[in-house]
Amino acid sequence: MTESDLAFMDLALSEARLAAKEGEVPIGAVVVCDGGVIARAHNRRETGADPTAHAELLAVREAARILGRWRLTGCTVYVTVEPCAMCAGALVLGRVDRLVYGCDDPKAGACGSLYDIVRDPRLNHRLEVTRGARERECGAVLREFFEKRRVSGESVNG
């Protein structure tokens, strides 16, 4: 893990905090290509009434739009929480080179926890994965969000 990995994860954490302010599960993502940020997003499932509006999926869509191509070769995706099966599949299908994520998701993670879609040798593309970037901070953002929801009596289902 490099210093630039940590700096880009700080940007993803900023997106996660924006999500929390909007009442969304606090997950943020950033797409980097050729050393620069080309897209960033946070969860918008509640505000968009869209079950697919996960941070990494939104960021990948925006990166593809900006680059004008669906193949995201040369790109690294930074996300605060291990991607789910849907998002891991999108990273494979988009030919992303590398994934850097903060904390594991033992209930839905598809990049090493429950499944390992992004490194499955049966698929036509595999990603390099770096886990644990700002792990404590990423986990803390999630814990604080769900603790506040429990205290206020709101539903805590992500």
Image (cartoon, grey):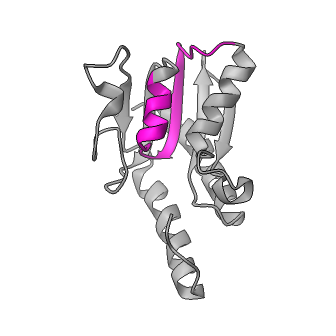
Give how far across and how far down residue 1 sits, in percent: 39, 32
Give how far across and how far down residue 123 sits, in percent: 32, 19
97 up-or-down from 9: above or below: above
Give how far across and how far down residue 11 sits, in percent: 62, 43
Residue 18 visible in the displayed image: yes
Residue 4 visible in the displayed image: no
Q: Residue at x 41, y 57 (%)?
A: 136
Q: Residue at x 34, y 38 (%)?
A: 111
Q: For residue 149: magenta?
A: no
Tell me which corner region of the image, top left, top right, bottom left or bottom right, holds residue 129: top left
Q: For residue 75: magenta?
A: yes
Q: Residue at x 57, y 60 (%)?
A: 25
* Residue numbers of the magenta segment: 69-92
11 up-or-down from 31: above or below: below
Q: Residue at x 64, y 48 (%)?
A: 42
Give how far across and how far down residue 51 sits, in percent: 59, 51
Q: Nearer the viewer, residue 128 or 51?
A: 51
Report the label total.
Answer: 0
Tell me which corner region of the image, top left, top right, bottom left or bottom right, holds residue 24: bottom right
Tell me: 104 left or right of 138. Answer: left
Q: Nearer the viewer, residue 93 or 72?
A: 93
